[in-house]
Image: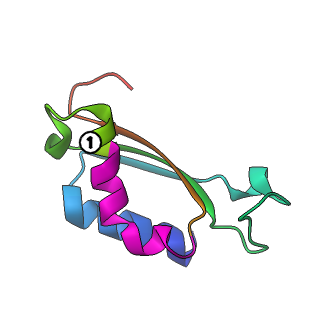
Amino acid sequence: MGAIFETIHDKLTAAFSPTRLEIQDDSDRHAGHAGATPGGESHFNVLIEAAAFAGAPKVARQRMVYKALAEELNGPIHALSVKALAPGEPS
């Protein structure tokens, strides 16, 4: 795992204390596309389950994750796909 992956993991864990957190570096599928970097770690998929998302609409949940990762989204992360769930919701 690379430095950006670890940062995503650490920041989301600190912000949400998730019961489930899956992070996938999807950069290799975007090689040659805009925003892709030779070393990868530019495109990620995140599935996060946390009590903080209970009762919040999907867009609000995504905004919460984007806020936690604002610095990375303004720099090394070109694309971030987020699936944010409350505990017990089907993935």
- Image quadrant for the C terminus? top left
Tag 1 secondary structure:
helix
Q: Is residue 34 above or below residue 49?
A: below
- Identify the residue at horizontal 56%, vertical 54% (top origin): 44
Q: Which residue is mark 1?
A: 60
Does residue 81 appear anywhere in the picture?
yes
- Residue 59 picture quarter: top left
Query: For the magenta stretch, what is the residue range?
Result: 62-76
Left or right for 33, reference 88 = right
Left or right for 70, reference 17 = right
Neighbour tally class for label 1: few under 14, some 14-19, many 20 plus, Cα within 10 Å: few
- Identify the residue at horizontal 60%, vertical 63% (top origin): 78
Residue 3, percent across and down? 53, 77
Residue 46, percent across and down? 46, 48
Considering the whole magenta stretch, tell me its main secondary structure: helix
Q: Is residue 88 above or below residue 86?
A: above
- Identify the residue at horizontal 15%, vertical 45% (top origin): 52
- Identify the residue at horizontal 32%, vertical 68% (top origin): 11
* Residue 74 in magenta stretch: yes
Amino acid bearing label 1? Ala
Residue closer to the observer: 55 or 22: 55
